[in-house]
Amino acid sequence: MNTYLEQLNEPQRAAVLQKDGPMIIIAGAGSGKTRVLTYKIAYLMEQGVDAFNILSLTFTNKAAREMKDRIGKVVGYSEAKNLWMGTFHSVFARILRSEADRLGYPSNFTIYDTQDSVRLITAIIKEMNLDKDRYKPKQILSRISSFKNSLITVRAYFNNSDLQQADLEASRPRTGDIYKEYVDRCFKSGAMDFDDLLLRTNELLARFPDVLAKYQDRFRYILVDEYQDTNHSQYLIVRALADRFQNICVVGDDSQSIYGFRGANIQNILNFQKDYPDVKTFKLEQNYRSTSNIVRAANSVIDKNKTKLDKEIWTANDAGDSVKVMRTISDGEEGRFVAQSIWENQMNHQLTSDQFAVLYRTNAQSRAIEDALRKKDIKYKIYGGISFYQRKEIKDLLSYLRILINPNDEEALKRIINYPARGIGATTLDKLTIAANHYKKSMFDILKNINTVDINLNSGTKTKLQNFVNMIQRFQIEAQTKNAFEIADLVVKQTQLVKDLQKDGTPEGVNKVENVQELLNGIKDFITDKIETGEDASLTSFLEDVALATDFDSDKQDEEPRVSLMTIHLSKGLEFPYVYIVGLEESLFPSAMSMNTRSELEEERRLFYVALTRAEKGAYLTYAQTRYRWGKLTDGEPSRFLEEIDDQYLEYLTPKVPEPSANRFIDASLFEDDSPKKIRFQKPIQKKRKEFLAKKEKPNMVPPKSKMKKVSEMSPKMNLFDGEITVGNVVEHNRFGTGKVLALEGKGPNKKAEIEFSTVGKKKLLLQFAKLKVI
Ligand code: ATP
Ligand code: MG
């Protein structure tokens, strides 16, 4: 048997060997779904299926790269390179580029990111003189997004009285008009937003049978990972493409469906069985990722969901440690606990930082964690914050590059027409917008014809505009002969972008200059990589990568190990030896916005299930009794999810029942002056918080700086007691108290003692760090 097939259990292997026809694997977390998908592709190729005929859709581009790598090991890298692999968005952006003219788009169309879309919608709302508090741009965008993902075009919207009625009742009767204008403006700008990449693919496949036939013929085998999170638009694309050969394999877990708010549809799993009546269904039930305590704890929570397919998950792995639960007084202390615990685990188990992840419900929670990690000198990487490419200085430079490729790109144009400042003001821009709308032309077309169009601008302004157009056109000519790096470098120099940033002189300014430099380096790396692999190294291809980049894509292999910080949504499909899930408080997790209906709450519970099942060896659940939210100190109650976990898998590091909290409804201090007896009401938590903050560094949470040296800085000589300790000694540890030495192992700096402490039970400690005193 092939060696890779030996790395599969019976049902996994059966699923891999099922070569043709529709099949579905719906199985619990960590049961090897992604592994099956990967090996199945290798198997198909071994069976003679051409890599060009295999399409595999993944949740991130990084997942696709890793898969390709693994497949490459089996079938050879040069063959694996030809696989069609990536996210829905990146694969179909590529297809849309080659078919763009069918839809009236230029092949170099721009991809608008969310920031571009929001800016455009904001501009439209302003032009239409609508109240931006009632028509909140982000809300409108998400409404438009849900239309697109349900294939409700502008025309369909205006034919649907229910939708219009809903917007009327929400006091936003002009939503449809904004939608129409938004679609028109994107089209005129030669731009597609993220949802268009799916919607337009559907349009392409629906309107042009020859195109459909071509891609049906190309993608003879289609595989989809994380199928539970596909939306309707994605579902229809897959269905159309697979219609001819019906070699379609989807894998997923209904219990991990967490993108319902973005239109993901659990129904797709059920539809699958209807769409393909002769579907083969495979069950995977063994979890290979986690200790049995973690698997069982996760099962006990997800069991509370009513809506789920019937499936069991078990593991042959050891019971492992209990899942630890920690209550802290404040979010700050929560951060310090996490940092301290990571540090201890690193020391106790000789681990590097990349073996840890901290997961949270909302991005805002990262700050307290970051502060604490930084104080302890633990390196971390944060995913999903403001991405590098969203920073102003980077976006400005990218906008220049976008214009060179697609001069009609209105959002890019608006960013740079007066940056660096060249005396083109907001009024001029407004007049240009009006003219562009009037002539039904792009803004750049108006600029090119500024002396002939009917526009009320003085000759000085017209000259400035003319100079701007000349500059862009010069760059465009240069771009024909220069590579992506050379042209970006030229743009930076000629526009004096960097000079402008340097003028500012502040540390932020310096930082921005470095970022621009970093982008240039990035373009250079991109070209080298692409040339090496024989792929498209053009500027268009670079900009597409940037538009569809996720934070994971910027991970560098040679970087030093770092703790990963991310929202639970982003952690899907990943695994880490140690996972900290923080902020387990009612209203935060489950989120206050998702507690109103059973289905919302069940989605939150699935989210918790996803979080917990990322952990291999250790899971920590923390909650804070007080937390700063929206600039205010708020009291928190433990999340219901903590209660829902079967107690036998948990260990409370702090007593389970918190101290009584202050009366939330009446501020006790109101009574202080009036009260004849001067009764003092206490606010235990807030007081504790004050005490805590006053102490600054609590000795048992944050050791003094001198004790926080990195491993490399620590000399084995530090251990004064090495050799003195023997089995049976009673020793004292400055945090765990007294304990008895049960066993010793290892030598020199690796010498460890197993100690039974009266407070915390058994621990294995490295002697050189433990600083034990024999008593
Ligand atoms: P998720 O639901 O989180 O996406 P999954 O079902 O896709 O999980 P994988 O990521 O494929 O699961 O596998 C989980 C872990 O178990 C991985 O580290 C994988 O390498 C390992 N694994 C899977 N199958 C086996 C096996 N038969 N033998 C040993 N290890 C396995
Ligand atoms: Mg997976």
Image: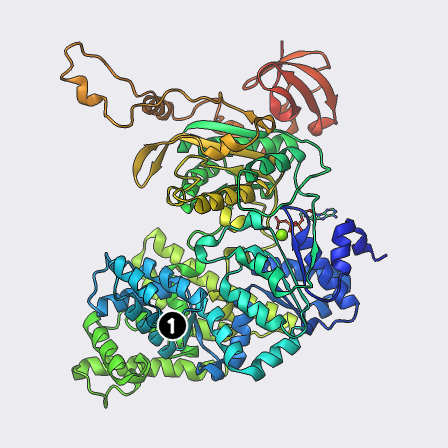
Dot 1 beta carbon under 8 Å from ligand 2:
no
Q: How many numbered discs sit on the rendered protein?
A: 1
The colour scheme applied to this rendered structure is: rainbow
Residue 516 visible, this orientation: yes
Badge 1 element: helix
Extreme residue in the right direction: 1
Mark 1 lies on residue:
156
Q: Nearer the viewer, residue 575 or 461?
A: 575
Extreme residue in the bottom direction: 452
Q: Is residue 291 left or right of residue 335?
A: right
Q: Position of residue 486 (x, y in %)?
A: 49, 74
Q: Nearer the viewer, residue 606 or 99?
A: 606
**Residue at the image position 44 percent from the left and 46 percent from the top:** 600
Q: Is residue 766 left or right of residue 545?
A: right
Name the kind of residue labelled 1 in the image. Answer: Ala
Quadrant housing the N terminus: bottom right
**Residue at the image position 36 percent from the left and 61 percent from the top:** 143
Q: Is residue 73 above or below residue 534?
A: above
The quadrant in which residue 112 appears is bottom left
Residue 480 visible, this orientation: no
Q: Position of residue 491 (x, y in %)?
A: 40, 73
Q: Is residue 510 left or right of residue 619?
A: left
Q: Nearer the viewer, residue 215 or 190?
A: 215
Label 1 crowding class (10 Å Cα cut-off): few <14, some 14-19, many 20+? Answer: few
Q: Position of residue 460 (x, y in %)?
A: 18, 81
Quadrant housing the C terminus: top right
Q: Position of residue 246 (x, y in %)?
A: 67, 70
Q: Is residue 16 above or below residue 625?
A: below
